[in-house]
Amino acid sequence: MRALVYLAVAACSFTHGAPATGNGSDAGSNSPRDAPIRDSSLLAPDAFEYRDAPTGDLCMASSNACSSAGGSCVAGTCVIPISSMSGATCPDAMPCRINCMTMNACKNDTVSCGNATSCIVDCQMMNSCQGDVIDCRGAGCTFYCRANNTCMNDNIGCTSETCTFDCCASNQCNNNSGDMPTYNLLGMCPP
């Protein structure tokens, strides 16, 4: 009986800290297969830093500025919905989109792209974006004039080469003054 106990103990014995056999089959061995190998020269210096917003998402990095402007961050852009005869001002240092969503929205007020990195003003319904003071002096702007009687009688301030009005309906983009943008009559307003 004693021989059987010695045989069982000898079969199960191990040496703590003994070098691994390298075949990866020994549980608990120090084999390179058991632990991930990290070669710090292959990683970016900040590879293990955590951030509140993904790199490149300027809107999420400054979401308070977007919400203060009446918008919310959607796919990296501050989207500001306007459904009344009022204006809007984009927050600085992020892409911006002002959606003038109802009849007479964004009318007789100021629509300002401010210092946004890019700016789209989407005039979606009849009589929207009329009689405004439009400020596109930062990175410029693109207006989508989708319905009849939109983008008319505006005073436009645009010092950028990227100021365009896509006129996608009839009787629009008329009687504007100030710095004249590029007009794309029968423009291609995206869906």
Image (cartoon, rainbow, N blue to C red):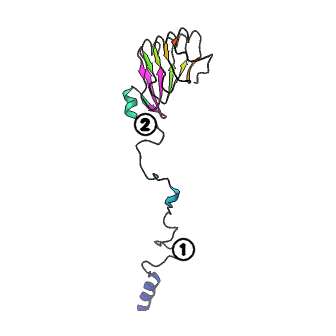
Measured from the top left, where is residue 32 in percent x and y?
51, 68
Q: Is residue 19 above or below residue 98?
A: below
Magenta residues, start to end: 73-100
Label 2: few (<14), some or many (≥20) within 10 Å? many
In the visual, does 94 lie left or right of 148? left
Residue found 53% across the figure and 76% down from its top: 21
The residues tagged by marks 1 and 2 sit, at their Cα atoms, a distance apart of 47 Å
Label 1: few (<14), some or many (≥20) within 10 Å? few
Q: Does the magenta stretch include residue 77?
A: yes
Q: Which amino acid does label 1 sit on?
A: Gly
The one nearer the camera, 35 or 141, is: 141
Q: What residue type is labelled 2?
A: Met
Q: Which residue lies furthest to the front in this view?
A: 159
Q: Quadrant of residue 84?
A: top left
Q: Mark 1 points at which residue?
A: 22
Residue found 59% across the figure and 10% down from its top: 170
Residue found 43% across the figure and 11% down from its top: 108
Q: Is residue 76 magenta?
A: yes
Q: Name the residue under label 2.
A: 60
Secondary structure at numbered mark 2 = helix
